[in-house]
Amino acid sequence: MRKILHEPLAHFFLAGGLIFLLYALVGPDDTSDRRIVIDNGVIERLESAWQLRTNREPGPEELDGLVADYLYEELFSREARALGLELDDPVIRRRLAQKMNLLAESAAQQAEPGEEELLAWYEAHPELYRTEARLGFRHVYFSHDRPGGSAADDAAALLSRLEGSGESVGPDLGDAFMLPRDFTDIGRSQLGRLFGDDFASRLFTLGTGSWQGPVPSGYGYHLVYLYGVQDAEPIPFNGSRDRVLQDWQRNRYEQTEKALLEELKSRYEIIYTNEALLLLGSE
């Protein structure tokens, strides 16, 4: 008997027997949900999904396989729901919630606003439709790890020597740095990612044509020589229409999702136990 129980096939039949026993005990007797109808709508959906993946129609054998896969999924999912297997499975609950979320997203994507509505969105959010500010600069770096924490003082001392000297500096000045000394054309966002947002913001307040600083970053201190600055400029509506449509649809989706959530909340009585409120820190 012990040898039989150690066989993998025996484990399979034992597990299957437990599942069907559980279903016999708790499964519903109602036969109204015991019919699976495979009609033209099902076939068309399966064919459409196949065409989206492969860019061609399925052949007869492939279509038979699609129907078999659909039937397998439908049978097992219905039995799983009948057993209540989704109730205590966070993965399944999350997937079901995601499917509801996708319904709201799909509804938003199918919405087609008129040109006047898109233009109104564009004009209400001018900060979203601008070119990125850019600049070019050279810098001399002073590390936080300098002996005695003298990076800021050493940078200030070198600045007094560089005043009026132009952009050229010797390679021996400052400390070795992992990033280039020269950036001829860099956008505001990339500058922030490389040196930090505070550093990037400070550079865009400096004038051009002279050494300035020290400017702190997460690495240390920098003396900076700006070659030039290109301010952000508005992008015309015609040049940003596709992005405006995407932003409008995303906003519509967020509104739809919020409205759906509130509607669903109104259909349920949501109760917090006293113990849960204590854990949440609520009164």
Image: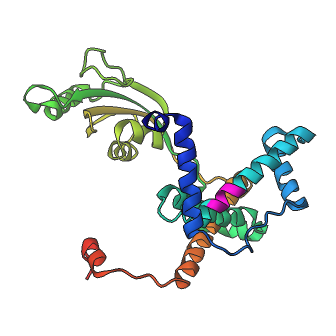
Task: For residue 111, say whether it is visible.
Answer: yes
Q: Position of residue 175 (x, y in %)?
A: 24, 21
Q: Residue at x 32, y 19 (%)?
A: 169
Q: Main secondary structure of the magenta part?
A: helix
Task: For residue 127, say whether it is visible.
Answer: no
**Which portion, as a residue range, is magenta?**
75-79
Question: In which quadrant of the rendered image does the C terminus lie?
Answer: bottom left
**45 in the magenta segment:** no
Q: Residue at x 58, y 50 (%)?
A: 16
Q: Position of residue 170 (x, y in %)?
A: 30, 15
Q: What colour scheme does the image use?
A: rainbow
Q: In terms of depth relative to the viewer, which is nearer, 74 or 115?
A: 74
**78 in the magenta segment:** yes
Q: Residue at x 30, y 75 (%)?
A: 276
Q: Position of residue 80 (x, y in %)?
A: 60, 60
* Left or right for 83, reference 37: left
The answer to which quarter of the image holds residue 43 is bottom right
Q: In terms of depth relative to the viewer, which is nearer, 142 or 94?
A: 94
The answer to which quarter of the image holds residue 172 is top left
In this view, 7 is above or below 130: above
* Left or right for 10, reference 183: right
Find the residue positioned furthest to the left: 148
Number of numbered discs visible in the structure rendering = 0
* Left or right for 225, reference 24: left
